[in-house]
Amino acid sequence: MKSAVEDVHIASFVVQHRAEAADAMAAHIAGSDDMELALRGEFRSVVLCECDNQYLVMDRIEALRALPGVLNVSLVYHHAEPGESLDAPVSSAPSSGAKP
């Protein structure tokens, strides 16, 4: 049974890969519902992931590491919060500092 408040986990990875692995890696990410190729480089790429729990984040890292030609996957950022708070409007806080 799912709880009323589901967490959303947002993560980013830096993937170090051989040049010839970039197409297969991009295809793997494109086939995923919760990953996006944010920046594709010749030897390094940045992947964004948004999923339901920290275990899925780790599964995505391991799946990327298992791709032929991928040398390393580093978790750069991970944030979790209730999904309903992501839908809430952002209040405008007073800015600090000098007035223009």
Image (cartoon, rainbow, N blue to C red):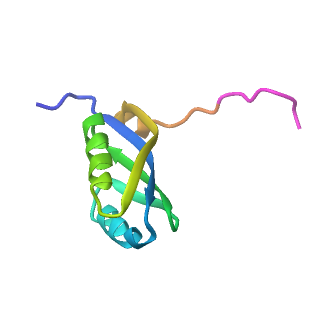
**Closer to the camera, 27 or 67?**
67
Quick check: is 98 in the magenta stretch? yes
Let me know if residue 91 appears in the view: yes
Q: Residue at x 54, y 36 (%)?
A: 90
Quick check: is 13 in the magenta stretch? no
The x and y percentages for residue 26 are 37, 67
* Part of the protein shown in magenta: 93-100
Residue 43, compared with residue 79, is above or below; it is below
Quarter of the image with the C terminus is: top right
**Closer to the camera, 9 or 22?**
22
Residue 67, compared with residue 23, is above or below; it is above
With 46 as the anchor, is 4 left or right in this view?
left
Q: Residue furthest left?
A: 1
The x and y percentages for residue 20 are 40, 73
Query: How many circles with numbers are drawn on the protein?
Result: 0
The x and y percentages for residue 51 are 31, 44
Quarter of the image with the N terminus is: top left
**Closer to the camera, 50 or 91?**
50
**Closer to the camera, 95 or 53?**
53
Q: Residue at x 71, y 27 (%)?
A: 94
The x and y percentages for residue 84 are 36, 34
- The answer to which image quadrant residue 70 occupies is bottom left
Let me know if residue 39 appears in the view: no
Q: Residue at x 29, y 48 (%)?
A: 60
Q: Residue at x 40, y 41 (%)?
A: 10
Q: Main secondary structure of the magenta part?
A: loop
